Amino acid sequence: MLTAALAKNPDAICIAALDSKAVIPLLEQADAAGIPIVGFDSGVDSDIPIATAATDNYAAGALAADNLAELIGYEGEVAVIVHDQTSHTGIMRRDGFVDRIKEAYPNITIVDIQYGGGDHLRSTDLAKAIIQAHPNLKGFFGGNEGSAIGIINAVIETNMQGKIVIAGFDSGRLQLDAIRSGVMAGAVTQNPVGIGYEAVKAAYMAIKGELVEKVIDTGCYWYTKDNMDADHIKPLLYD
């Protein structure tokens, strides 16, 4: 897709990279051609993008950790399933959660970290295996929609509703329903509207020759059944 975009010789490109390293050779081609690159949602391991509009995923992972820790009484065993360990989002959400738990909550132990590729079926199998291996598990963090849905499925299939606290990420109909029903405690939502808006704005500014901020933090929020219909949260949730 990026190769096809470059072939059209655009004035600018906005890209959300699934692999933070694999796109670099193509970004180097764009840079050599004088095409400004704006990253959005997921960054790349390169200085070529003139700006990246995204959630601070490390801070978002830490936000999930703080809320999950409170919900389980600041002690016990928790586990993590994220989508991958190649994308910036997967790495940063995982590290933000893990580092926050280790730094701030000495009575909480992370017993397992797994990678489900964002696939809810694979994540379900991983979560069920973790639940079976750790009968005292008190909490679970799912680092994206597919991971969280897999955890929800596993908790329901093992009849652990009310015994395992789930913290998710993003939204989607299944997560929203699980939060409303109480199966999931809450989740972190990004600001997808703001991410798209700021990416296009930065690309336009670059085309005009204006300076743009290198990192544009578009924010994130923790939502539960108590605030998910609030004016500042509802527009950020998708189903």
Image (spheres, grey):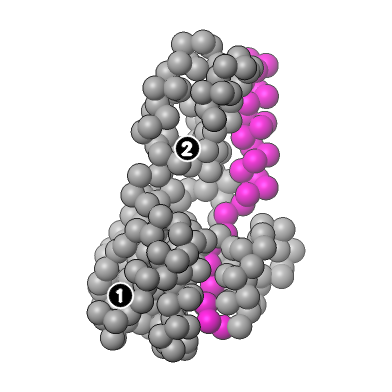
Nearest the camera: 117 or 216? 117
Find residue 84 and report its horizontal and vertical position in percent: 37, 52
Q: Secondary structure at mark 2?
A: loop
Q: Secondary structure at mark 1?
A: helix
Please report the residue visible at 51 percent of the width from the left and 10 percent of the height from the top: 33
Magenta extent = 182-209
Relative depth, front residue between 182 and 67: 182
Write the residue at 71% across / 68% down: 230
According to the picture, the residue beneath numbered tag 2 turns out to be: 17
Residue 196 % position (x, y): 65, 41
Q: Between marks 1 and 2, how big is the CA–CA gap?
A: 30 Å
* Residue at 71% over, 70% down: 229
**With 138 as the anchor, is 217 left or right in this view?**
right
Q: Position of residue 138 (x, y in %)?
A: 35, 82
Q: Does residue 137 appear anywhere in the picture?
A: yes
Q: Is residue 198 magenta?
A: yes
Residue at coordinates 42% horizontally, 34% vertically from top-left? 44
Q: Residue furthest right?
A: 231
Locate the N terminus by quadrant. top right
Residue 130: give its label.
1
Total numbered labels: 2
Q: Position of residue 181 (x, y in %)?
A: 61, 83
